[in-house]
Image (cartoon, coloured by chain):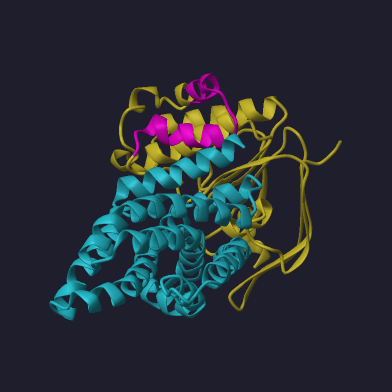
Chain colours: A yellow, B cyan
């Protein structure tokens, strides 16, 4: 099976601190891996390495498909209504409006389409970020603390979205300091690597 | 191409919507208004020195909104999302330069008319100023985006940014103001060469600075 995401002997140094080294992992179609561990363990750094936003101090990162990323920043223009803010990314991803509408419905954001992003709660912005990820159609999802600020109903929608994505042949690398209850998901304890 | 246009229009909309457009234009007009008070009621002196003042004001006006050119996108994660989608930093910088050149350049040329009237510039000199500014605006935009990218991680970066790129803009000032001198026939070619060089280098230098923001 061809791996979608492959990290081979990767090391990461932030500032003067070695976060981890010799880390290897493979994500095939349908795989999901939960990066767990305390704050500062390097979960977000590993996500950024996988996304290509950081260069590894050693080792190689191979991405064989497009990726979609959620991190702490929403990347949505705060002055725009939610739908227009998401429309920008749909144009960047060359996604049609129907796909975006379906993704908004999946995250129960259809009724907030006309609300300015600046008026949304943290959980709603996280859901909006997930809409962008779903609508992008990227096979590799990199989710950094995607459930922060989400209520239980939103977390359930997140879990459903992950399951659907995996069933469609996608892969998920998820960093979270608490268990989300995603079924059949491998774990990597980042705290043990430090 | 659709994605690039979306990026370009977004930058333009944010410039016009957030006031980043009007700030440099108002500054430009304020300088043109204040300068005659400083020179006094000597119309020939004003006409002779006003053209140079237009160039200084245009340069400073271009650098005024640098806080809004890169930092908000860095803070909001927009640059990361674009990088994840495979946009090169150089391409992002080039789009930002184009949007800034249009966003502030066109209104600046319109504002030149009242500014030139305030500075006692005759029709021929206004035409020369407009030509010179039109040639220099892409380079001024490139310097502004470069400055914004270099200082996006710094508090109070706009002041430092101005100091960083001001020396690079000196050729534009010299040759642009030189066009107003009847004996300076070659100035327009040198201005165009300077502007072309800075505009060509701008996306690569600013792109490298954008890449540095992620490390």
Q: Residue lying at the far front in this picture: please name it.
A: B182
Query: Residue visible at 41% across and 25% down?
Result: A108
In which image quadrant can residue B65 be found?
bottom left
Determine if the magenta segment contains residue A97: yes
- Give the answer, above or below, for where A173 lies relative to A10: above
> Residue A79 vs residue B4: left or right?
left
Q: For the N terminus of chain B, give its image quadrant.
A: top right
Left or right: where B72 falls relative to A143 = left
Name above or below for residue B184 compared with residue B71: below
Q: Is residue B167 visible?
A: yes
Front residue of this view, candidates A168 and B69: B69
Residue B82, given in percent of the width and then of the height, sits at 57, 48
Q: Position of residue A60 (x, y in %)?
A: 79, 59
Instruction: Determine the residue positioned at 44% across, 73% down.
Output: B182
- The residue drawn where x is 56% and y is 63% is B210
Picture coordinates of residue A20 (x, y %)? 68, 67
Label tally: 0
Residue at figure coordinates x 38%, y 33% from the top left: A82
State the residue in front, A93 or B187: B187
What is the magenta segment's predominant secondary structure? helix
Q: Quadrant of the C terminus of chain B?
A: bottom right
Q: Which residues are magenta?
A: A80-103
From where the camera sits, is residue B70 visible?
no
């Amino acid at each position: 099976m061809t791996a979608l995401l492959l990290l081979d002997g990767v090391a990461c140094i932030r500032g003067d601190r070695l976060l981890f080294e010799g880390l290897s992992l493979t994500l095939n179609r349908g795989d999901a891996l939960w990066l767990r561990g305390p704050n500062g363990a390097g979960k977000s750094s590993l996500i950024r390495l996988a996304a290509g936003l950081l260069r590894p101090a050693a080792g190689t990162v191979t991405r064989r498909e497009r990726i979609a990323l959620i991190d702490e920043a929403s990347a949505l223009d705060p002055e725009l209504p939610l739908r227009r803010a998401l429309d920008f990314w749909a144009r960047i991803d060359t996604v049609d409006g129907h796909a975006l509408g379906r993704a908004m419905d999946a995250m129960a954001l259809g009724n907030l389409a006309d609300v300015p992003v600046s008026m949304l709660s943290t959980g709603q912005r996280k859901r909006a970020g997930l809409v962008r990820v779903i609508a992008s159609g990227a096979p590799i999802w990199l989710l950094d603390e995607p459930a922060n600020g989400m209520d239980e109903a939103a977390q359930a929608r997140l879990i459903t979205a992950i399951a659907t994505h995996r069933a469609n042949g996608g892969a998920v690398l998820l960093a979270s300091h608490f268990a989300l209850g995603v079924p059949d998901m491998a774990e990597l304890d980042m705290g043990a690597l430090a | 191409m659709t994605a690039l246009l979306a990026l370009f229009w977004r930058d333009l909309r944010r410039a016009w919507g957030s006031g980043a457009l009007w700030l440099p234009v108002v500054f430009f007009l304020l300088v043109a208004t204040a300068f005659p008070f400083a020179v006094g009621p000597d119309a020939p002196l004003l006409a002779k020195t006003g053209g140079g003042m237009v160039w200084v004001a245009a340069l400073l006006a271009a650098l005024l909104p640098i806080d809004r050119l890169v930092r908000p996108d860095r803070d909001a994660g927009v640059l990361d999302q674009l990088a994840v989608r495979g946009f090169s930093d150089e391409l992002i910088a080039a789009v930002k330069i184009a949007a800034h050149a249009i966003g502030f350049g066109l209104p600046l040329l319109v504002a030149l008319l009242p500014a030139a009237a305030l500075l006692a510039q005759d029709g021929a000199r206004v035409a020369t100023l407009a030509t010179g500014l039109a040639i220099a605006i892409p380079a001024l935009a490139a310097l502004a985006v470069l400055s914004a990218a270099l200082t996006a991680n710094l508090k109070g970066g706009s002041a430092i940014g101005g100091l960083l790129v001001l020396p690079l803009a000196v050729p534009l000032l010299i040759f642009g103001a030189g066009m107003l001198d009847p004996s300076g026939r070659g100035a327009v070619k040198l201005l165009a060469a300077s502007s072309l060089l800075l505009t060509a280098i701008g996306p690569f230098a600013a792109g490298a600075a954008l890449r540095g923001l992620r490390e």
